[in-house]
Image (cartoon, rainbow, N blue to C red):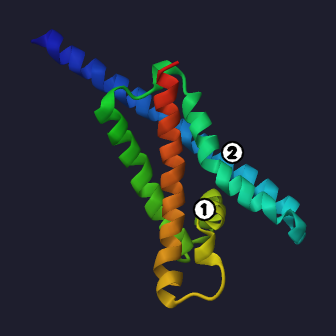
Amino acid sequence: MREKIWRGVLGAADVVRRYGFCLVWLLALQFVSCLLCWGELSLFGRDFELEWLVYGIGLLLPLVWGLAGYCVPARFRPRGRWQNVAFWLACTAPAAALSFWADRGGPEWLWMAFSPQLMGRLAWFFPVFNGPQSAHVLNTVRPLTTAAVHLLMMMGFLLGLYLGRKK
């Protein structure tokens, strides 16, 4: 009986270790994405000839996140379908809600923290931002596009985790 409990505790500690590493990996990835976006914006400045950089980086963010998911060391990857689903939900839902709030006019630190998602939405959902829009689009659809970009980035990360498991 004691051995069964001990195996359960060690299994739970292993899951916490894997989730903790992947969470730190995602936070570092978000920071690197922010640095990439801030560097691009400082280079972009007011030179509209470099506007293609905004769209290029925005379109490549899910690919970059997928590459980062591919590079996670094998011993720190979540194992099994349920661990992957739980990790994806735990990392996607709160961040998508915060990015939605950032687009709705949240605090300035949210704008800084979710600048990759805010920049990526311009590339992935350009028709929503082109021309005058109704209040519904401005207040509901545009913030949802920011959350959708975070969803795309996390899908890229999990696809990278899955493909990296096969190597």
- Residue 24 in the image, given as x and y percentages of width and height: 54, 37
State the residue in front, 154 or 51.
Answer: 51
Q: Which residue is mark 2?
A: 32
Is 81 situated above or below 52?
above
Can residue 14 be seen? yes
Amino acid type of disc 2?
A: Val
The secondary structure type at the circle numbered 1 is helix
Direction left: furthest residue = 1
Left or right, 39 with respect to 15, comes to right
The secondary structure type at the circle numbered 2 is helix
- Residue 82 in the image, given as x and y percentages of width and height: 29, 35
Q: Badge 2 local density, few (<14 within 10 Å), some, or many (20+)?
A: few
Q: Badge 1 local density, few (<14 within 10 Å), some, or many (20+)?
A: some
Q: Which residue is mark 1?
A: 124
| Residue lying at 67% horizontally and 49% vertically, measured from the top left | 60
Where, by quadrant of the figure, is residue 6 drawn?
top left
Amino acid type of disc 1?
A: Trp
- Residue 135 in the image, given as x and y percentages of width and height: 50, 89
Q: Given contact means CB atoms under 8 Å apart, are the residues at marks 1 and 2 in contact?
A: no
